[in-house]
Amino acid sequence: MSRIPDPDAYFAEVVDKYSEHVNPYLAKLLAFAGFGVEVYGEGCYIEDHEGRRYLDCLGGYGTFALGHRHPKVVEAVKHQLDSLGMSGKAFFSKPAADLAAELARIAPAGLQYTFFSNSGTEAVEAALKFAKVATGRSRIISTIGGYHGKTLGALATTGREKYRKRVEPLMPGVEFIPFGDTAAAVAAIDDQTAAFIVEPIQGEGGIHVPPDGYLRAIREACDRTGALMIADEVQTCIGRTGAMFGCDHEGVAPDIMTLAKQLGGGVMPIGATMGTADVWQKVFSENPLMHTSTFGGNPLACSAGLAAVRVVQDEDLVARSRDRGALMLELLRETQTRHTDLVSDVRGKGLMIGVEFAMDEVGELTVAQMLKRGMCAAYTLNNPRVIRLEPPLIISEEEVRKAVEILDGALTETSELLAMLA
Ligand SMILES: *Cc1c(COP(=O)(O)O)cnc(C)c1O
């Protein structure tokens, strides 16, 4: 049952306004892919204007770790709204203090301080700036396929030509090396390097898990040369990969760490850049306002963040992510054996899982088939051959099985479609 009295007119109005005033090309793309208008979200499900419910395995690119509108996060934000919404900026703010202290408690050792912003790309902007200021160097090393955002500074470190080419020249001094190549990383880091920026698991690049020891080797090379290690945990933070942070898998503590996506509990947007006392001293001691954000650290976002971090711990979602992720991987690998013509690889850690297809078009077709069967997924921004499955960490075993069944059915139909076309 639709919550909307006249769903067709509602859809037409929204698409029309998108076409006229938001982005006509995006409107076409979304409508062509079969997406409706989202009107309601609860737990692992998102509902469209026609009242169709979708198991949300896209989850706002990982934003919905706690599902949609987790009651504890909603309650925290509502409660905060009764006293103060945005910050006056001149005063101390308790929600920001509380969240910063809690993040320092759970983060890898030494990450004592947090600068708050409003998105992943802003968190990365701050990280790059802090690294340059703290080291007095300008060379940044990033990885091919790495995704760090689309604002100019972050884009300069995002490893895909398609998004960079028409904006160049970007921030100079950035070098790209293959992800997961330990020798290349160690060779690239030298005494001119301000920072090595890296995702513990590449998300938009196509869910790539680096070999064991990769992050440790980067850490050691940074220590040897005085370069800073920036872990971009915008997508991997608070439980997504079956550890609290992606770096925890190797017991590595970066100098700077960026967080966003699921940090707002799926209710508020928030970005965070964490750093060591040494970095903060070098960046802020001369000028406490060296980096600022009007909305960053606002009480609503910070109360959501604090509630989210508490829920992850209270509900033991890190262990859940590990267990449900292992089950999903196992079931997906079984499915792969039935579709070896279409699926070339299944990989991931925790509930950050990628399914790679043998051909480009298969991803698109399969995503559309999954949507028809009541499940959202999407391909990764830097790699159209890989679809990502990043369901809420609260997903049940039954829903994991259901998700894989839906993918299985979608693959069978895609296979039949391709055979017809051949
Ligand atoms: C999504 C993402 C970003 C950019 O975050 P936005 O909030 O979309 O600006 C940066 N880094 C990583 C690793 C991401 O996954």
Image: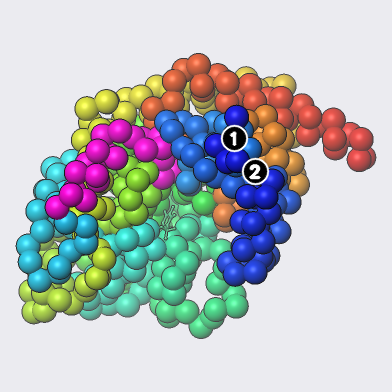
- Which numbered circle lies on residue 27? none
Kindly indicate the quadrant of the structure image that contains residue 167.
bottom right
Secondary element at tag 1: loop
Which residue is denoted by mark 1 in the rendering? Answer: 2
Structural crowding at the residue carrying mark 1, measured as other residues with C-alpha within 10 Å and reported as few (<14), some (14–19) or many (≥20): some
Under mark 1, the amino acid is: Ser
Query: In the rendered view, does 292 fall on the left or right side of 12?
Result: left
Q: Nearer the viewer, residue 15 or 46?
A: 15
The quadrant of the picture occupied by the C terminus is top right
Residue under the point 14% across and 44% down: 102
Query: In the rendered view, does 178 fall on the left or right side of 17?
Result: left
Location of residue 132 in the rendering, given as x and y in whole percent from the top left corner: 27, 74
Structural crowding at the residue carrying mark 2, measured as other residues with C-alpha within 10 Å and reported as few (<14), some (14–19) or many (≥20): some
Under mark 2, the amino acid is: Pro
Residue under the point 63% across and 38% down: 50
The quadrant of the picture occupied by the N terminus is top right
Range of residues picked out in magenta: 62-83
Asked if the residue at label 1 sits under 8 Å from ligand 1, the reply is no
